[in-house]
Image (cartoon, helix red, strand yellow):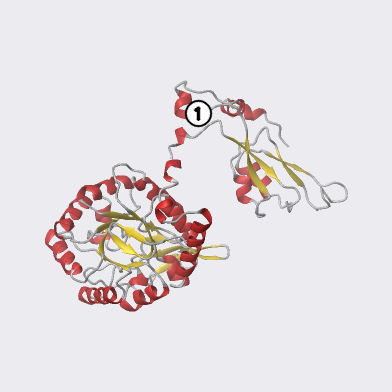
Amino acid sequence: MADLTTNFAGITSPNPFWLASGPPTNTYGQVAKAFDEGWGGAVWKTIGEPIINVFSRYGSVDLGGTRMMGFNNIELISDRPIADNLKEIAEVKRNYPKQAVIASLMVESKRETWHDMVRRTQDTGADGIELNFGCPHGMSERGMGSAVGQVPDYTCQIVEWVKEVATIPVIVKLTPNVTDVTYIARAAVQGGADALSLINTINSIVGVNLDTFEPQPSVDGKSSHGGYCGPAVKPIALHLVSAVAGDPAVKIPISGIGGIATWRDAAEFIALGAGSLQVCTAVMHYGFRIVEDLIDGLSNWMDERGHRTLADVRGRALPRVTKWEELNLNYHLLAHIDQDTCIRCELCWTACEDGAHQAIRRLERNGNGEAGNGKRGPVVEIIEEACVGCNLCAAVCPVQGCITMRPVPNDYPAVGWKDYAAGRGKLAPRSEHFHTAAWSAAPKP
């Protein structure tokens, strides 16, 4: 059986699945219920001087039949008194000693204020502290959140203040709303951070009501930019996690956040270097019980692949993340259409003809209105001389496995653009064909 036990920067938990700081971790009752369901840890909703929230707080983006594909919030940090939050953190930790309990903190940028808050937090018995340097709305206008996390010097300075008194691990939560997240990660490391977590939410406006022209979510006719999260942000989060995990100047544990909703999502984050996983939007959508599927799915996959511990998986994909100029120009693919499963919808032809490389021909119906295997509709075929293996046809095809991308063997050694441009490598004929713009001579329908 796969062992999901996690040791993250010295913080242990029975599994890597933690609740991220947010509405699901606002009270003792919520966190206790989550731990009863099987969650390995929880990062408490960010604590600071109590704020006043607006009543309309959430907006979402749907995609087809998928609700909350993207999720937006303009909610701020905890609106409950600091003392109440700290009391409940202590109570949770006493009653659930095996689970990881992390306090998320955000206060004004004064050394003595941070010292006081850290000392009070440590008295609860919390396993660690997460510094919220990522919140992009509301708090940033007050000089906190991403207003700190977007400036390397501020990040480094506050981490140094915290580490002056901290006796438990300090995790720095990074904002994605920067040009290069590695600069902020390095600043946190320089300040003495024990670990990093990312990503926090992305600045966004999720939509406009075209009847009233009110941005969403509307607060008495107006709105503000908020934090975007949910499944839609997972690709961005994976990229930024990999960028930090692959940076030789970082080398501290990373907690992955951003669109995790399934065990596959979790495995991808771990493969790109995450040591623990934080989930929020999926819990807000489906409830705490999703952790059962997360644990079972990840365990079963690890068992099937022969991975005994999370360390066997962690970072395995990082060596395969490289710069574009190092990608092999002599690796060739061709699309293949399975005519037996093709439903004659022509989506691949339309996409390729109008949006890609005009590498699919469309054969009209015969006089009986049939074309191949008794199916009605035109037959579509790949024009091999023009196909650049871009994957678009496979991406738009509604039939799973109907269009596949197949490698085309050649005897030419791998060569990246950097080496080729410097004269250290030769292109295979097919690469040369497209490199010299000979594609314009490819046959057309």
Q: Nearer the viewer, residue 403 or 379?
A: 403
Q: Nearer the viewer, residue 221 or 22?
A: 22
Quarter of the image where one finds residue 380: top right
Extreme-right residue of the structure: 368
Q: Residue at x 43, y 37 (%)?
A: 323
Q: In the picture shown, does residue 426 fall above or below 161?
A: above
Q: Is residue 428 left or right of residue 306?
A: right
Q: Residue at x 56, y 30 (%)?
A: 330
Q: Is residue 333 left or right of residue 422?
A: right
- Could you say where residue 122 lies in the image, as x and y percent from the top left? 19, 67
Q: Residue at x 50, y 63 (%)?
A: 297
Q: In the picture shown, does residue 60 fall above or below 268?
A: below
- Could you say where residue 145 lies in the image, as x and y percent from the top left? 27, 59
Extreme-top residue of the structure: 423
Quarter of the image where one finds residue 183: top left
Q: Quadrant of the C terminus?
A: top right
Q: Is residue 105 left or right of residue 333?
A: left
Q: In the picture shown, does residue 83 fall above or below 270?
A: below
Q: Is residue 215 visible?
A: no
Quarter of the image where one finds residue 233: bottom left
According to the image, label 1 marks what residue?
415
Three-letter amino acid code of the residue under disc 1: Val
- Could you say where residue 263 lies in the image, as x and y percent from the top left? 48, 61
Extreme-left residue of the structure: 112
- Could you say where residue 404 lies in the image, as x and y percent from the top left? 65, 46
Q: Is residue 245 visible?
A: yes
Q: Is residue 278 left or right of residue 188?
A: right
Question: How many numbered discs?
Answer: 1
At numbered mark 1, what does the secondary structure look like: helix, strand or loop?
A: loop
